[in-house]
Amino acid sequence: MEAWLEAVISQLGALAARFGTQGFRTVYVGGGTPSCLPERALSRLLSAVSGLSPEPPDEWTVEANPEDLSPALLSLLSGAGVDRVSVGVQSLEPEARRLSGRRGDPGSCLGRLESLAASWKGRLSADLIYGLPGQSARGLADDVDTLADLGFGHLSLYELTLSEDAPMAAMAASGGLALPDPETAQEQYDAARERLTAGGYSRYEVSNWCRPGGESLHNLGYWEMTGWLAAGPSASGTLRIPGGFLRMDNPRDDAAYLAAVRADPAAAAAETSILGGTAAFETVMMALRGSAGLDLEDFSARFGPRARALVEEACASFPDLVTRRGDRLAPTDAGMDTLNRVLLACLGRLQEGMGTP
């Protein structure tokens, strides 16, 4: 752990020195579970991040497991300048938590969430998953109501997706675990969606819902491809360059990451230039995930009027899925549910008209 911490802090400093920092608009510590870190280690990490920016960011999020929440942790986060906590709840149903290997029973998890809601002065976000074994539509709908009543202004609703090396995938493949069929998973999603709408949440991205003003600024940066730096094993950064993006991918393996940082923290990531039609499509793919959609003026300035015309032509074939709002192309709610149809059409048009580098 100490070696990991030193490597991340070293890479953060090298990135700041290389690219310069006039201040970050947002900071996100997660994509793992930083709340598992001992207090001293987490404090060092947050201090290192804070020291890179002369002014506090507009939004600073730290992820946490409910079982890790404590007055000491919340005091540490607040003292460091963190103003948004994102909690990986996933489910409050006993069987769903047991079968998916979540720590803590529903009672203890709910108790931690209640304490968090009562004491935390910043914003709150939570992740839920549908399609879990042992989950019910009624239970997921009740989970939404519980979090809404506690004041969570941002909720993410993700469909269960299993990687090949996940323990749950191996259990399902061997017949030791029964996963819900697509119809059952859809029933769960529909039930949650109904409660989210009733609770005053709007769907502003494929899997993300919020009450007015509760959007994640950091996630919006991803979907708008504004550019971000990233430190840590498997972390991926993206910066705008003329004609596309510079992609910076850190080694996924911990040992390989440590070796790369020790060799040269400024060059630990593998760098790839994403240009031309590939960069244009990636911009469209990310933008059409969100309700704000694609900024056509910005897109044309970066990739040219021809690329803009190609995307407009492709989207015109799906009037029920993509709508025009001024200088933006935005997905309808149905479009978010069937986005791949639109994206495949955009990809085909861009490949025909621009090719790929």
Image (spheres, rainbow, N blue to C red):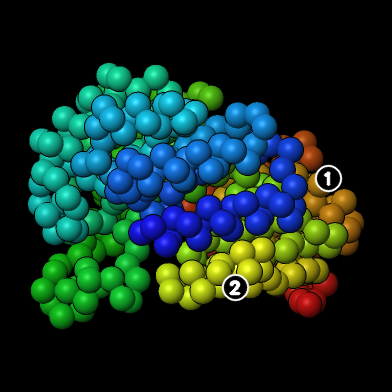
In the rendered structure, find residue 87 and report the number of the disc placed on it: none
Horizontal side of 87 relative to 154 (left or right) equals: left
Residue marked by disc 1: 297
Nearer the observer: mark 1 or 2; the answer is 2
For the view shown, which residue lies furthest in the bottom direction? 174
The answer to whether residue 180 is visible is yes
- Circle 1 crowding by C-alpha within 10 Å: few under 14, some 14–19, many from 20: few
- Circle 2 crowding by C-alpha within 10 Å: few under 14, some 14–19, many from 20: few
User: Disc 1 or 2, which lies upstream in sequence?
Assistant: 2
Q: Residue at x 42, y 26 (%)?
A: 78
**Pick the front one: 339 or 105:** 105
- Place of residue 33 in the rendered image (x, y in percent of width and height, measured from the top left): 35, 50
Q: Residue at x 21, y 76 (%)?
A: 170
Secondary element under disc 1, as helix, strand or loop, is: helix
User: What's the CA distance linking mark 1 and mark 2?
Assistant: 42 Å
Find residue 249 and report its image quarter.
bottom right
Q: Residue at x 56, y 37 (%)?
A: 50
Find residue 15 and report its image quarter.
bottom right
Horizontal side of 257 relative to 199 (left or right) equals: right
- Place of residue 197 in the rendered image (x, y in percent of width and height, measured from the top left): 39, 30
- Place of residue 314 in the rendered image (x, y in percent of width and height, measured from the top left): 72, 61
Whether the residues at callouts 1 and 2 have beta carbons within 8 Å, the answer is no
In this rendering, is residue 211 above or below 289? Answer: above
Total numbered badges shown on the rendered structure: 2
Residue marked by disc 2: 263
The answer to whether residue 329 is visible is no
Q: What amino acid type is highlighted by mark number 2?
A: Ala
Location of the N terminus by quadrant is bottom left
Horizontal side of 285 relative to 189 (left or right) equals: right
